[in-house]
Image (cartoon, rainbow, N blue to C red):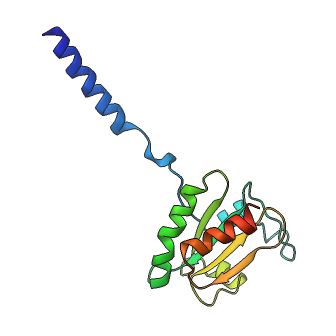
Amino acid sequence: MKKSIFFAIFILFAGVNLLAQDKTTEPKVQHLTYKEFIDKIWDLEKSPKEFIFKGETPAIVDFYADWCGPCRKVGPIMEKLAKDYDGRLSVYKINVDKEKELSAIFQVRSIPTVIFIPMQGQPMMQVGAMSESEYRKVVDERLLK
């Protein structure tokens, strides 16, 4: 009897512990504001004419809007890339409706627009949605080479 009560209590605590674990450790796409962009990607106020990447890993920046159909197709791909390349690639999203200044700086006129940022060199821009395999090819061949 004591063993079954002890076992039941053990199972109860184990279940509570599993539920209480922080699930936020899974890699996710990070949404950026103008200030966060300056802090994490490029301080364009200090060096407006020279791109100086501030990141610790290569990055993808996805300019999107909630109402954009192709953007909604690219979103899950970006989430998957963030998970699959965790620790080797940072994936960010910028909402063009909320961050108009950043959209203007990068001359984003069509969405989705994705910027691929290597550790050294200049960013590369892709206008329009691509397939997951095409995004992976750019990451593998241009960002993580």
Quadrant in the picture for the N terminus: top left
Q: Position of residue 133 (x, y in %)?
A: 57, 72
> Can residue 90 be seen at all in this image of the molecule?
yes
Give whichever of 63, 129 is nearer the camera.
129
On the image, the x and y values in percent for residue 10 come to 27, 21
Looking at the image, which residue is at 64% across and 59% down? 90
Q: Is residue 55 left or right of residue 2?
A: right
Eyeballing the image, is 42 above or below 48? above
Q: Give percent across and percent down for residue 100.
A: 61, 82
On screen, residue 50 above or below 26: below
Asked if residue 68 can be seen in this view, the reply is: no
Please name the residue shown 51% across and 63% down the image.
79
Among the 4 quarters of the image, the one containing residue 11: top left
Query: Percent x, y for residue 32?
Result: 60, 66
Residue closest to the far bottom: 109
Which quarter of the image is occupied by the C terminus? Answer: bottom right
Q: Is residue 60 left or right of residue 83?
A: right
Q: Quadrant of residue 108?
A: bottom right
Quick one: which residue is furthest to the left in this view? Answer: 1
- Is 122 drawn above or below residue 22 in the view shown? below
**Left or right of 106, for residue 96:** left
